Image (cartoon, grey):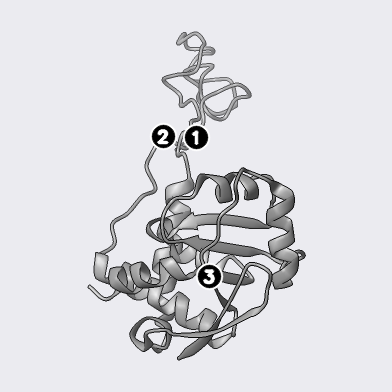
Amino acid sequence: MEVKVLDFNGKDTGRKVQLSDSVFAIEPNNHAVYLDVKQYLANQRQGTHKAKERAEVTGSTRKIKKQKGTGTARAGSIKNPLFKGGGTVFGPRPRSYSFKLNKSLKRLARKSAFSIKAKEASIIVLEDFNFEAPNTKNFINVLKALGLENKKSLFVLGESNKNVYLSSRNLKASNVVTSSELSTYAILNTNNLVLLEGSLELIEENLSK
């Protein structure tokens, strides 16, 4: 598929780029997308939750009443989970939520995400640009020129650009990443995907392996 290239003022440069059909025009595999997004969100979980169980609660282990003749249930310790202040039964323990996915499945998921965005006409190709110094106002002007000032956007750079990254850092609705940092979740969790020309070859090369 062909997409026109815009400059950072939002004007047509008169050039077009050919996006690879093997990356941007495949039949999306929804299950692969689901698994990759699930893994990404699972990896964000710290897994440091912990509740004290019976053996860890502070308290005496003395038998609090005789075994028989009280007319109530048996009780051996004040740390019994049935009592207030007692231990938690099967409480959460520290654990890792991460799980493994094959590289081929993750590549399929990212290609599916790109294809979904292409089908929605949510991909903008922008010529490479730079700022002389970090300046949030300049980045906001780029967003306005592209009509993205009130939309969630993801800018994908070919290589790290400190000035562009720092210029966008204070804006909640816009993120700047390099092509190597892209994830299926990031692609789908945005209204518009802005691909700089320098990132296209790297993206297609990485996903065509």
Asked where in the image residue 125 lies, by quadrant, the reply is bottom right
Residues under numbered marks 2 and 1 in contact, where contact means CB atoms less than 8 Å apart: yes
**Extreme left residue here?**
209
The image shows residue 137, relative to residue 76, as above or below, that is below
Can you tell which of label 3 and label 2 is closer to the viewer?
3
Residue 103 appears left or right of 183 = left
The image shows residue 167, relative to residue 18, as above or below, that is above
> Toward the viewer: 166 or 109?
166
Query: Looking at the image, is mark 2 or mark 1 earlier in the sequence?
Result: 1
> Toward the viewer: 99 or 126?
126
Relative image position of residue 87 (x, y in whole percent): 51, 26
Residue 94's mark?
Answer: 2
Relative image position of residue 178 (x, y in whole percent): 44, 56
Query: Looking at the image, is mark 3 or mark 2 earlier in the sequence?
Result: 2
> Toward the viewer: 170 or 39?
170
Disc 3 designates what residue?
127
Residue 172 appears left or right of 2 = right
The image shows residue 141, relative to residue 73, as above or below, that is below
Disc 1 designates what residue?
49
Pointer 2 local density, CA inside 10 Å: few below 14, some 14–19, many at least 20:
few
Pointer 1 local density, CA inside 10 Å: few below 14, some 14–19, many at least 20:
few
Query: Looking at the image, is mark 1 or mark 3 earlier in the sequence?
Result: 1
Q: Identify the residue at image location x=51%, y=70%.
A: 195
Type of amino acid at the residue the image marks with label 3 = Glu
Q: Identify the residue at image location x=60%, y=79%.
A: 122
